[in-house]
Image (cartoon, grey):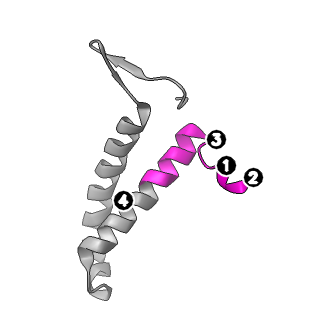
Amino acid sequence: MHMTSDVDLFGVFIPPSVFVAILALVLLYALRRVLAHLGVYRAFAYQNLFDLALYFILFALLLFAFGGATLTPLFG
């Protein structure tokens, strides 16, 4: 999937980053269950803030994996 064109969904043009955001949310829910089972959340005082940071990390990794050139302006 290239991040250059919108997706036509029944006549509504949706940017591909929306689908990446939804995929990151699904991965976050699965990862939260694993982390809760392992007891990782006991190490953090603000679990919601940790989840938010984890979501943005997943979102950025997925954008980089699917888009490829999304992080190149950061590196020059």
Relative to 54, say whether 71 is above or below.
Answer: above
**Mark 4 crowd level (few <14, some 14–19, many ≥20, 10 Å Cα):** many
Q: Which residue is mark 2?
A: 76
Residue 4, how many percent across, how many down?
Answer: 55, 27
Q: Which mark is residue 45?
A: none
Q: Nearer the viewer, residue 16 or 33?
A: 16
From which residue to which does the magenta span run? 59-75
- Discs 3, 1 touching: Cβ within 8 Å: no
- Discs 4, 3 touching: Cβ within 8 Å: no
Relative to 9, say whether 16 is above or below.
Answer: below
Mark 2 or 3: in front is: 2
Mark 2 or 4: in front is: 2
Q: Is residue 52 left or right of residue 64?
A: left
Q: Which mark is residue 73?
A: 1
Which one is earlier in the sequence, the residue at label 4 or at label 3? Answer: 4
**Mark 2 crowd level (few <14, some 14–19, many ≥20, 10 Å Cα):** few
